Structure formats: C-alpha cells, structure tokens
Amino acid sequence: MPDPRRVVSCLRCGGTWTGFRRCHCGSCHLNFSSVTSFHRHRKDFACLAPASRGLVLVNGYWSLPGNRPQTSLNRRSATPGRAKGLRASTADPVGAVSL
C-alpha cells in the first residue's frame, strides 16, 4: 500500500494516484502513467478515449503499449540501490552523491 502522505487526490472526482510522473486529467478524470500518455489522449483541447489512441490500461493507469507504470517494486536502476545518473565514486568529491 502506498504511503498515505504521498497519495495525491482530485477534489472533483475523488480519484487518487501516486508518483511524480503520473498525470490525472482534470477534464475526463482518468489517470495516466506519464505526460506522454496524457498528451496522447488529448486532441484539439478535447479528451479522446485512451484505447482509441493506442493506450492500454495497466494497474489503473493508461499507458503506452509495452510500458509499465513505475512503482517502487518494478523500478530498475543502473546500479542496484542507486538511481541512474548519480555518481557513487568517492574519488571525485565534487560529483559524489551520498545516498
């Protein structure tokens, strides 16, 4: 279960979602796994049926085919335990990041 402090909700529909990359449409009140999938369901400032635009429903989020919504359970990083792009080396203290 997600941390209740990190759950975002819509005051108009009561829908909830988690994650910084997620999108919720204020018009049709559907949840999307990314900004790209959100934009794909819109055309000329109107909402279109996500399935008609090639999106698939995965775990309650409309997503691009083949993409899984990111969760703490399926997120992968370049080095186990570290986020992509962060330097783990202590040889370069200017660029080093402690986690």
Image (cartoon, helix red, strand yellow):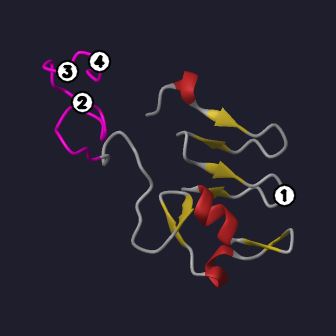
Q: Is residue 2 left or right of residue 74?
A: right
- Dot placed on the residue nearer the N-terminal end, 1 or 3: 1
Decide: few, some or many residues near mark 1? Use Cα within 10 Å; few <14, some 14-19, many ≥20: few
Residue located beneath label 3 in the image: 92
- Dot placed on the residue nearer the N-terminal end, 2 or 1: 1
Q: Quadrant of residue 34?
A: bottom right
Q: Which of the numbered marks, if any, corresponds to residue 62?
A: none
Q: Which of the numbered marks, if any, corresponds to residue 87?
A: 2
Q: Quadrant of residue 54?
A: bottom right
The answer to the question of whether label 1 and label 4 lie on touching residues, with beta carbons closer than 8 A, is: no
Reply yes or no: does residue 36 show up in magenta: no
Q: Is residue 9 left or right of residue 83?
A: right
Residue 38 lies, with reference to residue 40, above or below; the image says above
Tell me the chief SS of the magenta region. Answer: loop
Which contiguous range is marked in magenta? 76-99
What is the spatial separation of the Cα atoms under label 2 and label 4, in whole angstroms?
Answer: 10 Å
Q: Position of residue 11 (x, y in %)?
A: 81, 37
Q: Amino acid at mark 4?
A: Val
What is the spatial separation of the Cα atoms under label 1 and label 3, in whole angstroms?
Answer: 48 Å
- Dot placed on the residue nearer the N-terminal end, 1 or 4: 1
Judging from the image, what secondary structure is the residue with disc 2 in? loop
Q: Which of the numbered marks, if any, corresponds to residue 94?
A: 4
Decide: few, some or many residues near mark 3? Use Cα within 10 Å; few <14, some 14-19, many ≥20: few
Which residue appears at 29% of the width and 32% of the height? 86
- Dot placed on the residue nearer the N-terminal end, 3 or 2: 2
Residue located beneath label 1 in the image: 27
Decide: few, some or many residues near mark 4? Use Cα within 10 Å; few <14, some 14-19, many ≥20: few
Q: Is residue 45 left or right of residue 69?
A: right
Q: Amino acid at mark 3?
A: Asp
The answer to the question of whether label 3 and label 2 lie on touching residues, with beta carbons closer than 8 A, is: yes
- Dot placed on the residue nearer the N-terminal end, 2 or 4: 2
